[in-house]
Each structure stands twice: as structure tokens, then as C-alpha cells.
């Protein structure tokens, strides 16, 4: 048997990434991670995206995890690299998106005020413990294979989410991580993903309750999307003839065109079909949700007291109470439940379906009427932008919406066919979501139209990676609402105090910036030109990214 060669730590990390089948890494370079760059350069090539803004590394890794179901990997330097990328990690935690966040770190016994450090050398690792499933600071080179294998295992298992692994530099000036000498390391062993199997007796009991119910409703969380169980969900809804409502961060789990689509629930802003469906129900079964979350508090406040919850969690903690609250993988549970129900089928409820269809049509008619009233406004009514996007984009298009008023408009107006029809940051609500997510989506789905939707304030937070889209051929279409305000806070302050302070600014010419970054740039100030501009930009994306800047009004989004 040939003797194994020793490795430096950077090589060990690179080989772990290769063993885990990592296809893409999002990174900004820095001296503390040079050895890992060197190691990656020596292995089988993988796609390596050099970002220009450290926050976007983790935002891109989050997007990759959501879109592929595989852990997104980002790599940042010590200290500011780690802290600058925390928003995307916390966002991935809230979104149940698998991620492996790898960071450089100051030496194990660093002096106070070391380069990229503060007094406590391990402070970055401590901070990440609160926003990850697991945070590890490697202290021996021999532990790298085990730590990396555990990181990927935890990121994928149960309720997926982010993990953080940091590797200290050997010294402030060293070209090595942990130590100069090469070490013969244990063979790398992948750890299988763990999923929660449902108990057969629970499945049988829940199946009987659903048969006995007269008006069941299925309430769905993002777990159904993350675990790829949309087909099973729709099959169950059709078998039960049950309307489907979803948490607002699970929009797209059922197409809007489906007769059993009943909209989303969110505190103070639930879809009207959702409220009506829950009002009529005598049993609600929640799948892919988590006990103890804000979305469950909202559901409990409006739903029938008869509830079943299949929690999307790592373990059934004390938050899960009673015989009707269990933890199981959503796909495995739905598959088992469909098997238990077998050939049983609830008769088609024409009255309920007609009522839902009428409600859905009424919502669209109201939105059309609002647009009609503003069709000639000098400052463009945002609803008209949404209307034009619905006309130009097909049902396969990906729309990644940033945080703010644009997100609220899109949530109301956007035609929904898939989870990618309207992607949003989720409960963490980190601004600067749209652009990095769209870049990743276009790289993963080059044959589909991909749109980044953002307000001017949010876009300015992420604009540094506009050249990255052009550099990597991610020919996305960006739609930027320009009104010189942080629109949502502008509206909130006005509603609360009757005036606003510190929420306005001078926006640049985004179309001009786009051209300077190697993209097509179009500015629209007349509502009659919106659709034409979007089609022109859509055509331009065959050769380069394109940006449409729309001069919008300060209108608050309507309640439907």
C-alpha cells in the first residue's frame, strides 16, 4: 500500500470540498484564506465566483442552497470578512437553506488587537453560534476532515441550515493555516444525511382524522419546498379536496392557477382567500412549519382549534406538545400519508371551488382597477410595473425580490406558478437579496429568464456585484424602482408620525451605472413605455445583463 502524503490545511479543506461534491464557491479573497485558495487551485476545477462585496458571498450561498437543495459554500477571510457576511448566514438559518460558511481566523493564541482580530481570538466563532446550526473553530490540523464532514452532514440533515467553520492562521504573517508542517490526515469520510421518518401509527391516526373532517385545510411551510415535496402536497390536496394556505415565505408551493390555491398567511397582511378558507375549516393540518415560530402564532390565531402539526425541525423539542404535534421530513410524511389513504377520495366540492375561484378573480379585478386609476400618473405607479412583468415573463421565469416596498407590491401582484416565481429573503429580511440571488439563479438555470427586483435603497447596498454578473455571463434582467427613498421605512414613519426623517436620498442614474458595468441600461419615466422597455431588456439578456430603471411614485402598496 502506497504511503499517504502529508497535507497542509488549505489542501485538506480543498479535498474535503471535492469529496463533498461541491460545484461552486462564492468568495472574496483575503490573506487569512490564501492557503485555502492555493489548495482549491490544485484540485479538480469547480466554479469559483469572486464577489466584490463580502455580504454577497453568503447571500449567494443561501440562494444556491434554496435553488439546488445542496449546501451553498462561501469562503471569507477573518474578522471583517466573517462579520460582513453574517446577514446571509442568518438569512439561511431562517430560510432553512443548507450552507457551509468557511472563514479564516486569527491565530489560536493571537495577541490582543491582532490583525483582523479584537481581544478575544474566538469572538467570530462565538457570534456565529447564534445564527447557525453549528459553529466550529478548528484547533488541530488533524481534525479538518472530521470537522468538514460533520459540517456538511449538519447543513443537510433534518431542517437544513447554515454551519460555520473557521480555520486559524498559523501566525499574523504566515502563509499557512494552523501550522507550517504537512500532516498525514485521516481519510475523508462523508457522513450520511439524516431525515426524520414519520411513525406509522401517527400516519394512520392522522389519516383517519383527515377522512373524518368535513372541511380540512392544509397549511404549508417552506419545509415542503426545501424537501422537494410539492408534487406530494398537491396530490394530497386533491385527494382531500382541501384548500392549501401557506406561510408568506412559502409562496409558490402551489400555483396560483390551481383550484385549491388559497393564498398566504402573514400577520396583518394575509391573502383574503386564506382568511376565508381557514374560517370555513374544521381541521387544519400543518406541514413543513415549525412550532413556536411567528408564522405558527399567526396561524393559531385564525385557524380552527382542531390542528395537526408535522414540524420541520431537527428534533421534537418542548415546543411540540401533545399527540397531534410531531416532527418528520415533509416529503416522507406526505408520501406515507398518501399511501395510508390509498384509493380513498373525498368527493369534489363544487361550491367550495366556485367560491375560491370567484375570490381569486375578485382580487385580480381589484388590482386591475387600481392600475387603471393610475395609468397616466407622471410618477409611475408600481402596480403598473408588476402588470408589465406579468405580461413579459412566462411561468418559468425566476423573480428574486429584494426587501422593501417592491417586495410588497410583488407579493400582491406577481403571478405565481413555482417557488421561483417570487423568491424573497424570508423572515430575516436582509436587504440586498435580489441581485446576488438572481446571479446565482441565472448561473444555475441559464435557459430561464431571471429578474432581480429591487428598490433603489436596497440596490445601492448590493450594487458592487453588478460587474460580477457581467463578468460571469449571468445575463439577468434587473428592475430597479427609483424614487429616492427607503420606501418601506418612509411609509412606516409617515403612517406613525405624520412625517418622515432620514429616509430620503439622492439616487444615481442606475441605467448609466449599468452601462459602465458592461450591462444594458434603460431608464423609464412614462408608464406607457414600461412593457416595451422590459421586452427590450429581455432581448438584451441574450448577450449581456440588462437593467431597467423605473421612476416610480411613493404610493403605498394596496391591501387586498
Image (cartoon, grey):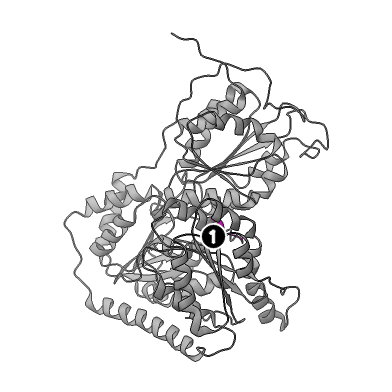
Residue in the image at 27% along x and 52% along y? 337
Mark 1 secondary-structure assignment: loop
Q: Is residue 400 left or right of residue 513?
A: left
Q: Is residue 102 left or right of residue 119?
A: left
Q: Which residue reaches farthest left?
A: 343
The vertical placement of 395 against 73, above or below, is below
Q: Is residue 33 left or right of residue 391?
A: right
Residue in the image at 37% along x and 71% along y? 262
Is residue 404 visible from the viewing direction of this image?
A: yes
Percent x, y for residue 170?
Answer: 72, 26
Quadrant assignment, res 367: bottom left
Quadrant assignment, res 82: top right
Percent x, y for residue 120?
Answer: 77, 37
User: Magenta span has 344?
Assistant: no
Find the magenta span and give its range. 431-436
Percent x, y for residue 543?
Answer: 47, 59
The vertical placement of 74 against 373, above or below, is above
Q: Which residue reaches farthest right?
A: 112
Residue in the image at 72% along x and 73% along y? 506
Viewer-proximal residue, 286 or 499? Answer: 499
Viewer-proximal residue, 393 or 525? Answer: 525
User: Magenta span has 433?
Assistant: yes
**How many discs appear?**
1
Q: Which residue is mark 1?
A: 425
Instruction: Check disc 1: other Cα within 10 Å, few if <14, some if 14-19, many if 20+.
Output: many
Viewer-proximal residue, 109 or 11? Answer: 11
Q: Quadrant of the N terminus?
A: top left
Is residue 300 visible from the viewing direction of this image?
A: no
Amino acid at each position: 500500500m502506497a504511503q499517504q502524503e502529508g497535507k497542509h490545511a488549505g489542501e485538506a479543506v480543498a479535498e474535503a470540498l471535492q469529496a463533498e461534491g461541491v460545484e461552486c464557491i462564492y468568495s472574496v479573497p483575503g490573506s487569512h484564506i490564501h492557503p485555502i485558495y492555493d489548495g482549491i487551485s490544485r484540485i479538480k476545477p469547480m466554479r469559483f465566483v469572486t464577489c466584490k462585496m463580502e455580504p454577497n458571498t453568503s447571500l449567494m450561498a443561501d440562494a444556491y442552497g434554496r435553488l439546488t437543495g445542496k449546501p451553498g459554500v462561501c469562503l471569507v477571510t477573518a474578522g471583517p470578512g466573517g462579520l460582513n457576511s453574517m446577514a446571509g448566514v442568518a438569512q439561511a438559518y431562517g430560510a432553512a437553506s443548507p450552507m457551509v460558511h468557511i472563514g479564516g481566523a486569527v491565530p489560536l493564541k493571537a495577541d490582543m488587537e491582532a490583525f483582523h482580530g479584537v481581544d478575544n481570538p474566538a469572538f467570530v466563532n462565538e457570534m456565529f453560534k447564534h445564527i447557525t446550526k453549528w459553529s466550529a473553530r478548528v484547533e488541530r490540523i488533524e481534525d479538518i476532515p472530521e470537522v468538514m464532514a460533520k459540517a456538511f452532514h449538519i447543513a443537510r440533515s433534518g431542517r437544513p441550515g447554515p454551519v460555520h467553520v473557521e480555520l486559524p492562521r498559523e501566525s499574523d504573517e504566515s502563509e499557512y493555516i494552523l501550522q507550517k508542517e504537512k500532516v498525514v490526515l485521516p481519510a475523508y469520510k462523508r457522513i450520511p444525511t439524516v431525515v426524520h421518518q414519520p411513525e406509522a401509527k401517527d400516519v394512520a391516526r392522522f389519516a383517519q382524522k383527515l377522512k373524518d373532517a368535513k372541511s380540512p385545510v392544509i397549511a404549508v411551510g417552506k419545509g415542503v419546498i426545501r424537501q422537494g415535496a410539492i408534487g406530494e402536497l398537491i396530490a394530497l390536496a386533491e385527494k382531500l379536496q382541501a384548500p392549501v394556505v401557506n406561510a408568506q415565505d412559502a409562496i409558490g408551493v402551489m400555483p396560483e392557477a390551481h383550484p385549491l390555491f388559497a393564498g398566504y398567511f402573514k400577520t396583518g397582511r394575509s391573502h383574503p382567500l386564506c382568511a376565508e378558507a381557514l374560517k370555513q375549516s374544521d381541521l387544519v393540518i400543518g406541514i413543513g412549519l415549525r412550532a413556536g415560530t411567528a408564522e405558527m402564532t399567526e396561524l393559531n390565531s385564525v385557524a380552527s382549534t382542531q390542528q395537526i402539526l408535522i414540524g420541520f425541525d431537527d428534533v421534537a423539542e418542548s415546543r411540540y406538545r401533545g399527540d397531534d404535534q410531531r416532527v418528520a421530513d415533509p416529503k416522507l410524511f406526505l408520501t406515507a400519508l398518501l399511501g395510508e389513504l390509498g384509493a380513498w377520495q373525498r368527493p369534489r366540492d363544487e361550491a367550495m371551488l366556485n367560491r375560491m375561484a370567484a375570490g381569486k378573480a375578485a382580487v385580480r379585478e381589484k388590482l386591475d382597477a387600481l392600475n387603471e386609476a393610475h395609468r397616466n400618473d407622471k410618477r409611475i405607479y408600481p402596480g403598473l410595473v408588476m402588470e408589465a412583468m406579468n405580461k413579459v415573463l412566462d411561468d418559468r421565469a425566476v423573480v428574486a425580490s429584494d426587501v422593501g416596498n417592491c417586495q410588497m407590491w410583488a407579493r400582491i401582484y406577481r403571478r405565481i406558478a413555482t417557488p421561483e416565481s417570487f423568491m424573497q429573503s424570508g423572515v430575516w429580511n436582509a436587504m440586498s437579496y435580489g441581485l446576488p440571488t438572481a446571479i446565482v439563479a441565472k448561473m444555475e438555470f441559464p435557459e430561464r429568464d431571471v429578474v432581480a427586483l429591487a428598490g433603489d435603497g436596497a440596490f445601492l447596498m448590493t450594487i458592487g456585484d453588478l460587474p460580477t454578473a457581467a463578468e460571469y455571463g449571468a445575463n439577468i434582467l434587473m428592475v430597479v424602482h427609483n424614487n429616492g427613498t427607503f420606501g418601506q421605512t418612509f411609509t412606516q414613519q409617515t403612517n406613525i408620525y405624520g412625517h418622515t426623517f432620514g429616509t430620503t436620498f439622492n439616487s444615481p442614474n442606475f441605467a448609466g451605472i449599468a452601462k459602465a458595468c458592461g450591462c444594458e441600461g434603460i431608464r423609464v419615466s412614462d408608464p406607457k413605455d414600461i412593457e416595451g422597455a422590459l421586452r427590450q431588456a429581455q432581448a438584451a439578456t441574450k448577450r449581456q445583463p440588462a437593467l431597467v430603471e423605473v421612476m416610480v411614485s411613493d404610493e403605498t402598496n394596496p391591501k387586498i
